[in-house]
Amino acid sequence: MKSVEVKHVPILKDDIVQALVEPFARVSSDSPACWLVDCTFGGGGHTDAFLQAFDSSPALRRHRILALDQDAEAVARGRSRFHSAIELGRLEILQGNFGDAAQLVEQRSVLGLLADLGFSSDQLEDPDRGLSFHRDGPLDMRLNPDQGRSCLELLQQISEFDLERILRELGEERFSKRIAAFLMESRRRGELPTTTKALVDLIVRATPKHARHGKIHVATRTFQALRIAVNRELEVLDQLLQDVLPKVLPSGRIAVISFHSLEDRRVKNQFKNKELFHPLTKKPIEAGLAELEVNPRARSAKLRIAERLPK
Ligand SMILES: C[S@@+](CC[C@H](N)C(=O)[O-])C[C@H]1O[C@@H](n2cnc3c(N)ncnc32)[C@H](O)[C@@H]1O
């Protein structure tokens, strides 16, 4: 394990705790305890807030939290940080992909579920992950380095047609054709970039000079697109929305924080399914100025909350 210090700051914490804990307060004392599932444990910021909220009243204290993360390092760090809550049986932390969590949720009485999508600040700042264009590291990008193919393996295997489509659709990259062509040419020469810095250099060369110094870093969109593809983020989100969320108990609540429009659109559409959900947020909740000042990462976060309807 690299560091036990957690840098990630949880986003929209108060809105989430208030919305997700409320149904637990309505469970009568003679009914069995229920579970709140944090699908994206990360640095444990939201889990910690749920534990504190459950701690705040004797009626809530018996309810439990199941936290998941696909990243073994986040799980190990969390197990050490929260060992007393784990020993008391108030918290369980498991390594796994939330796309596969249908059975886990079905087997428990789940009355609340959070998915705070994407990656944590701790993962972004770890050069070994290759997620940041500001830090030089291997071209990996996997949130679970033990599963699937790395970004470099993807670039070694993909066709130019598919690569261009990924950069355009998942990154909305204006110069997707040029960047895909430059990457394929470097592959033909046996010179594919193997580090994040080498990929940034190639993206800069592929981008016309007049477009190299825009509002956002020239590599932002390509890195986003490749990360989404490497981690199959949209496919897994669809699994969560379609297979896992319906297993939450009626009158239970679900909160999803997304960071780009491709995710938010999927969440919004699923919450519109009138047989299963009642959306509690017509428009997504966004971070206010005070939060943005201390946590600029919250800038693109969109929170949607829905209630699970009775069958
Ligand atoms: C934005 S961070 C969550 C931060 C957390 N809410 C906190 O307050 O510290 C997202 C976390 O979800 C994990 N993650 C992303 N996709 C996942 C998936 N499909 N299954 C399980 N964990 C996932 C990442 O590894 C990362 O640790």
Image: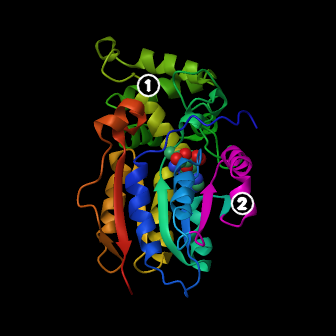
**Residue 270, position in %: x, y?**
35, 67
Which kind of residue does numbered mark 2 sit on? Ile
What's the magenta region? 61-90
The residue located at (36%, 80%) in the rendering is 309
Per the image, label 1 sits on a secondary structure element best described as loop
The residue located at (44%, 25%) in the rendering is 219
Q: Name the mark nearer the viewer: 1 or 2.
A: 2
Mark toward the start of the polypeptide (1 vs 2)? 2
Per the image, label 2 sits on a secondary structure element best described as helix
- In front: 161, or 169? 169
**Residue 75, position in %: x, y?**
69, 50
Image position of 31 (left or right of 204) = right
Residue 137, picture quadrant? top right
Asked whether the viewer can see residue 211, the reply is: yes
Residue matched to label 1 = 219
Q: In this view, does 84 lie above or below 111?
A: above
Residue 33, picture quadrant? bottom right
**Residue 21, position in %: x, y?**
45, 66
Quarter of the image for the N terminus: give it: top right
Q: In this view, does 78 lie above or below 185?
A: below
Q: Is residue 193 magenta?
A: no
Q: Is residue 24 above or below residue 53?
A: below
Residue matched to label 2 = 86
Q: Does the magenta stretch include residue 84?
A: yes
